[in-house]
Amino acid sequence: MTEFDAVYYDGRTSARNAVRVRAADDGQIHIAGDAVDVALPLAGARVDPPLAGVARAIRFANGAELRTEDCGALDALFSSQDRIERIAHVLEGRWRYALAGLALVAAVTAWIVIDGLPAAAALVADAIPETTQRAMGDQTLRTIDRTLCAPSALDARRREALLGDFRTLAASSGEANARIELRSCRAIGPNAFALPGGIIVVTDQLADVLKSDAELTAVLAHELGHARYRHPMRAALQSAGAAALVSVLAGDAVSITGIVVTLPTLLLQTGYSRGFEDDADTYAFERLKALGISPRAFAEALAALEGAHAARSRDAGQSLPDYLSTHPSTGRRIQRALSAQ
Amino acid sequence: MAESDVAATAAPSGAPSPWERPDVAAQATPTRSVLPGPETVHPVEFTGTSGEYFRIWIVNVALTLVTLGIYSAWAKVRKRRYLYGHTRVAGEGIEYLAKPIPILLGRLIAVAVLAAIVAADFLVPALAASRPLRQLLSIVVFVAAGPWIMVRSLRFNARNTAYRNIRFRFAAAYGDCFRIVATYGWLLLTGILYPFFRRRLVRFGVENHLYGATKLELSFDFGKPFVRAYFVAYGLFVLYMIGGVLPVVGIAAAVAAGMRVKLSQIAPLGFLLWLPVYAIAIGLTFAYIRARTINAIFNHLRIGPIRFSSSLRVRDVAGIYFSNAVAVVFTLGFATPWAVIRTWRYRMSKTAMTAAAPLDGFVQAEADHIGAAGQEIGDMLDFDVSL
């Protein structure tokens, strides 16, 4: 038989009653105080799970409640309820478990960031049908057309040569589904990029900077590598995953810390992109060699692009620090291309 | 969404009060319990500690990670129960009664709906091609779904908040909220008139709450200080930005002259200088609005014979927000529990409650007499949609 002190609220009014409680063997809880004398059945009653410093209540089926700080008595009466939260309560009660939790969070987070998220993104990207990815790519392309780019203004001969080179490259690489789109994008400058679904966008400004066909083919091979490995899709999935992870960790922080949440997401994303660039470079070197073109062409293309970008940023009077750039440093990539010959 | 302001201000602050006869009870008659008599001041205090809350928080984050997010619903309940339970009004903690499963269900539904919206955005060609169509659709979704989400989450939170075993309730229906958004929503489009929309929404949120059978009331003159808070903050923001832009341009010009380059060429430097000025302006504006609107709401809130007062000071709130932000950044997020606890403790230390009648006289609403079984069924139909 268990006895303890409690506060009784009948659930009809807010009147507070200090009571003495006796749990009898017949399954009745006897509650007695100055203005109360009732017996309520234990069957059908529930008890709040334990939580540090918070008074727990027995909630009876008729809506009455008994609040008490006497956790031992409650645990004796309700030994089988809320197993999950009982375990959580034990873990929450000691610093050594909290520190173990901290280590676990740090380790799991590190694993997710380094291995888990990229692997999961690659799996999911492979599971998304080609047509869906292409629809996403088309949608992105429409947005780009609306905001950043105009139709290509290259002369017909140059355009045909470019398209022909791309077809040869795609066919020889077994990427017949890949598609090239030419655009004039002053806002973007000399650049090429891959969208989900194997869509590769090349700007007129790039064609202006890269005079030789071998250099252009080298850049196209690099973008084809992105398409081959579904990098655009994986990047989108990874950034969604990184955002979800950060919100799990810091979701409670007051809204003023919103920027704090976006910053690590951005930096994570930058790190991932560098890995993708290296993979696409390696792919490009192989494809070029298969076509009988030296990877040196890639190094030359990079050098030409770097010159063009430097000129652009001198004009605009700004530059981004290297660690915020999504491409690995150009010098290192040129070295890799030269040693891949 | 609306949960943060309306519910967090109205519900958890819940305090007990006067006597009403059960037969008059559940109905929307504002119970003017203007009972004469000496007013009693009841303490409102927060007894939680950051150490305890940190342990709860880190264990819950760890379990959430290990269970791939499933445990997050349990985590939410435990964290909120801790904050409510340690908020002691006249010595008794506030009860948070939500069960984890409905919260989990609500989250799964929300994730599914979001995923469907994103998928539709990419996959429905007509939608992808036409910008006006997309804009029209987002307005329709905002006007139609916004009120639904708001009412749902206010109702869920109210129903699951209790004090002295008397539950709160949120009595408005979807239609009421929809009418307000449809009638006053245009104020949002004007931007500058947003505070008036907000005022209407807060009044709606607070006045449709009941503590048991007793309506929460906002006295009529609540609106003036509430709206003034926004406009004063906007004005200060503009002044601050003007005050801030001059020194930044001055410094940049001096540096440019020193380096013998054109002003436009050191734009990145100007941006770096500008960033903290801007961040402080935003933080101060936010703190001003937050402190003054919470004060406006609580100083005009009545529950039967109970009234409240809130005396948050802008400089305190700003100090707390800035130091929280710095601490959270420099600890990679691990200072979050500390930030939550000190913010909550400060708020409660500036809240006071006065009652003109004993706290014993509040009665439960009729509908809530059904007890545990009815509640379980309610929980199955009722899920939390706030994320």
Image (cartoon, coloured by chain):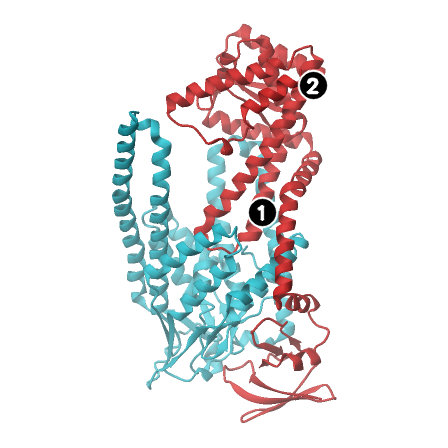
Chain colours: A red, B cyan
Q: Is residue B279 above or below residue B99?
A: above
* Chain ID of residue with mark 2: A
Left or right side of B39 for B74: right
What residue sits 53% from the left and 17% below the top? A303
Front-most of residues B248 and A160: B248
| Mark 2 neighbour class, 10 Å CA radius: few under 14, some 14 to 19, many 20 or more | some
Front-most of residues A60 and B54: B54
Mark number for residue A286?
2
Left or right side of A263 for A71: right
Callout 2 secondary element: helix
Front-most of residues B128 and A302: A302
What residue sits 52% from the left and 55% below the top? B149
Q: Is residue A239 above or below residue A215?
A: below
Q: Position of residue B140 (x, y in %)?
A: 48, 45
Q: Position of residue B266 (x, y in %)?
A: 34, 30
The C terminus of chain A lies in which quarter of the figure?
Answer: top right
Q: Position of residue B198 (x, y in %)?
A: 37, 55
What residue sits 53% from the left and 30% below the top? B129
* Chain ID of residue with mark 1: A
Q: Which residue is mark 1?
A: A244
- Amino acid at the residue labelled 1: Ala
User: Which label lies toward us, 2 or 1?
Assistant: 2
Left or right side of A287 for B119: left
Can residue A336 be seen? yes
